[in-house]
Image: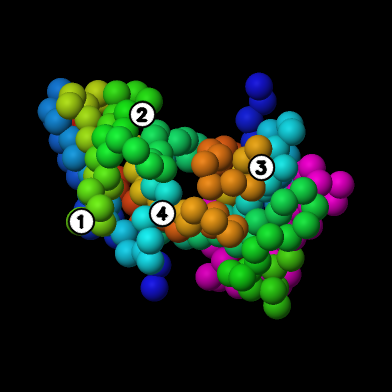
Amino acid sequence: AQSVTQPDIHITVSEGASLELRCNYSYGATPYLFWYVQSPGQGLQLLLKYFSGDTLVQGIKGFEAEFKRSQSSFNLRKPSVHWSDAAEYFCAVAPTSGTYKYIFGTGTRLKVLA
Amino acid sequence: EAGVAQSPRYKIIEKRQSVAFWCNPISGHATLYWYQQILGQGPKLLIQFQNNGVVDDSQLPKDRFSAERLKGVDSTLKIQPAKLEDSAVYLCASSIRLAGGNEQFFGPGTRLTVL
């Protein structure tokens, strides 16, 4: 079955520290991969996406993610976290044909300590 | 450019009552999605429209949920009758067309509480 796993429900980091959020997927073929962020009371905003090519993708707000086919992973990273990065982060996958239906992970809630 | 609009933002109802949510997508976006996000979970797709046609409604509980997108622009999602387990945030999203590479733009959601 197709699934997305985000093993960390909550993560707490200090402001200025580095961040890595994990995402693993189970899929028949390499899907499209996405990271979204959701601030309280807001809709989801796309941070970055991977379709093909360079396995290190850059996104908005200083985020990047690395696709590792051998590990079926698409981890999100940021070298220095800001207090405004506190939010919930969702990894999602979509097939490369058909309805392109998204499957979301359960999310990782990030808390940033001043 | 205006984003995806949803109303109401909050709704509290008793079980067995009915409720409707409205969504207006970004102008020119052909594809519209309704998601259900239960507390502690990621969004789950309920129904996907391409213009005014349904592309996927495989996870829509059709005995109580219905959705329409007349004229291929705005959309309504209805629950009748509501159950306690329907308490969730209902998100509407749109994309310019049905294609894997297209970003989905999300509205702020409607938080439904069923008592």
The mark lying in front, picked from 3 and 1, is: 1
Please tell me if label 4 and label 3 are on a single chain. no
- Are circles 2 and 4 on residues that touch, CB within 8 Å? no
Camera sees residue B15: no
Q: Give the residue displayed 81% in from the left and 46% down from the top.
A: B72
Residue located beneath label 4 in the image: A31
In the picture provided, is A29 more to the left or to the right than B86?
A: left
Residue A111 left/right relative to A61: left
From the image, tell me which residue sits under label 2: A59
Query: Which quarter shows the C terminus of chain B?
Result: bottom right
* Residue at image coords 59%, 58%: A99
Q: What residue type is labelled 3?
A: Arg
- The quarter of the picture where residue A38 lies is top left
Label whose residue precedes the other's in the sequence (4 or 1): 4
Q: How crowded is mark 1: few (under 14 residues within 10 Å), some or many (20 or more)?
A: few
Q: Are marks 3 and 1 on the same chain?
A: no
